[in-house]
Image (spheres, helix red, strand yellow):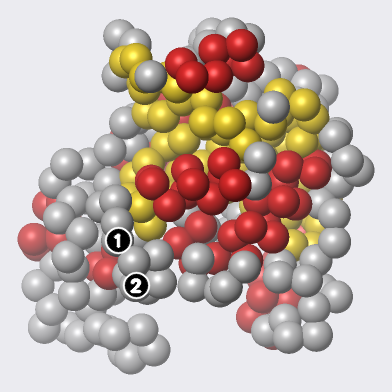
């Protein structure tokens, strides 16, 4: 049985005993609001807030002052530039689950990406706090001591993991082991129609697939939101989700951009339609 609250958030009432301590949205957080508006992000990064809704998303997931947060595959640090300063100011801890240096198959690009990430975020503890990086991948070990993490954030990654047999369950198992009882697995990803092939390779993944995989790993679906929904996204683009902003791909992966490609239709759609899910470790 499910119910919709007044903010358009679907709450899974079937786990009411677990969910009683997890309101659909946390209360407004002035420190988080200040970091988002006045923190170290560039103007270009802040311009994407209209599509990515960082404040509403983090409040929905229940981020709290003093939390220990694992940010999975943070890339160039879009979420890092919000989470790390916020956690530094509130007594929390930021952990980046990034390239696994012990993986013999790790690419040079991934290795260099981790080095660049550490070079940016580990040298300014006054701004970012004590940022730590831990290896994450198909053969990696624990992300943190068992039961020590408050929130694990997985943003736009599961569609890639689904291409590799067994990787989603391995990853979800890692997250569950690291989380405290009642800890949150926060998920955002490009949303395919239910029943879509998770190995299609177009960058989209269905909510039904993600929910089933999370439940299989022992998580409870606490709530789902349309904060990041985009009904204009038809999900049938020539180069997958990467045809849309901000990537704006104009040719198949690995080929040079096509200067004759007309981006207007895809720019008018904007960023993708995305699921926003909150799971808890029961």
Residue located at (85% from left, 34% from top)? 147
Q: Tell me which corner region of the image, top left, top right, bottom left or bottom right, holds residue 152.
A: top right
Please give the label number shown on residue 196. Answer: 1
Residue located at (9% from left, 62% from top)? 264
Identify whether 163 is placed above or below 135: below
Taking depth in this image into account, of 9 and 96 the one nearest to the observer is 9
Q: Secondary structure at mark 2?
A: loop
Residue 22 point in image, percent of width and height: 58, 14
Residue located at (50% from left, 66% from top)? 162
Residue 75 point in image, percent of width and height: 59, 60
- What residue would you read off at disc 2? 200
Identify whether 124 is placed above or below 21: below
Residue 60 point in image, percent of width and height: 49, 23
Alpha carbons under labels 1 and 2: distance apart? 8 Å
Residue 239 point in image, percent of width and height: 25, 75
Q: Secondary structure at mark 1?
A: loop
Q: Tell me which corner region of the image, top left, top right, bottom left or bottom right, holds residue 224.
A: top left
Taking depth in this image into account, of 220 and 45 the one nearest to the observer is 220
Specify whether 115 is left or right of 113: right
């Amino acid at each position: 049985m499910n119910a919709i609250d007044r903010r358009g958030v679907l709450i899974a009432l079937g786990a009411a005993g677990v969910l009683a301590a997890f309101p659909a949205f946390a209360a407004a957080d002035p420190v988080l609001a200040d970091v988002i508006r006045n923190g170290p992000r560039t103007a270009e990064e802040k311009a994407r807030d209209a599509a990515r809704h960082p404040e509403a998303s983090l409040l929905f997931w229940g981020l709290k002052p003093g939390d220990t947060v694992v940010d999975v595959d943070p890339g160039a640090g879009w979420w890092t530039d919000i989470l790390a300063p916020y956690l530094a100011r509130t007594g929390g801890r930021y952990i980046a689950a990034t390239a696994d240096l012990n993986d013999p198959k790790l690419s040079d690009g991934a290795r260099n990406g981790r080095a660049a990430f550490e070079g940016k975020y580990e040298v300014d503890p006054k701004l970012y706090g004590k940022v730590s990086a831990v290896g994450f991948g198909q053969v990696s070990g624990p992300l943190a001591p068992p039961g020590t993490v408050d929130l694990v954030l997985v943003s736009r990654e599961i569609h890639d993991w689904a291409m590799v047999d067994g990787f989603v369950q391995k990853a979800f198992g890692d997250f569950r082991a690291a989380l405290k009882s009642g800890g949150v697995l926060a998920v955002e990803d490009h949303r395919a129609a239910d029943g879509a092939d998770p190995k299609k390779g177009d960058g989209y993944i269905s909510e039904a697939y993600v929910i089933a995989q999370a439940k299989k790993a022992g998580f409870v679906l606490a709530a789902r939101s349309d904060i990041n929904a985009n009904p204009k996204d038809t999900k049938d683009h020539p180069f997958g989700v990467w045809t849309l902003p901000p990537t704006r791909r104009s040719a198949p992966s690995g080929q040079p951009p096509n200067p004759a490609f007309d981006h207007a239709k895809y720019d008018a759609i904007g960023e993708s339609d995305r699921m926003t899910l909150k799971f808890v470790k029961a």
